Image (cartoon, grey):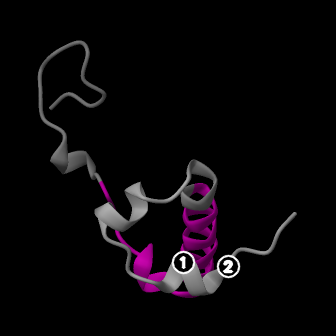
Amino acid sequence: MDTPDTEHAARIWTPTQLRKLSPEERGAILAAAAALAEEMYRNDPELTAFEAIGVDDLFGESSNSIYCR
């Protein structure tokens, strides 16, 4: 397996620049960026120390709702 190219992942790409690349190049950039993000999320608890949806955020009386009030 190739090592992600962190230089390309750390670069700020514009949509126009990305569209000019081949699908393989775009895929490699995405893989490298994902590897960098994984490291950040594993090592910085502040990035994941929140509740995305709490019980109080879900409202509804429908039988289709997960939590009914």
The residue wearing badge 2 is: 5
The residue wearing badge 1 is: 9
Locate residue 8, reporting x and y percent.
56, 80
Q: Is residue 32 magenta?
A: yes
Element carrying mark 1 = helix
Q: Amino acid at mark 2?
A: Asp
Locate residue 58, reporting x and y percent.
19, 40
Q: Which residues are magenta?
A: 27-52
Residue nearer the viewer, 49 or 37 = 37
Which numbered dot is residue 50? none
Q: Amino acid at mark 1?
A: Ala
- Residue at image position (26%, 46%) is 55
User: Is residue 60 depicted above or below 53 in this figure?
Assistant: above
- Residue at image position (38%, 74%) is 13
Locate residue 28, reporting x and y percent.
64, 63
Q: For the residues labelled 2 and 1, say whether their Cβ atoms are less than 8 Å apart.
A: yes
How packed is label 2: few (under 14 Cα within 10 Å), some, or many (20 or more)? Answer: some
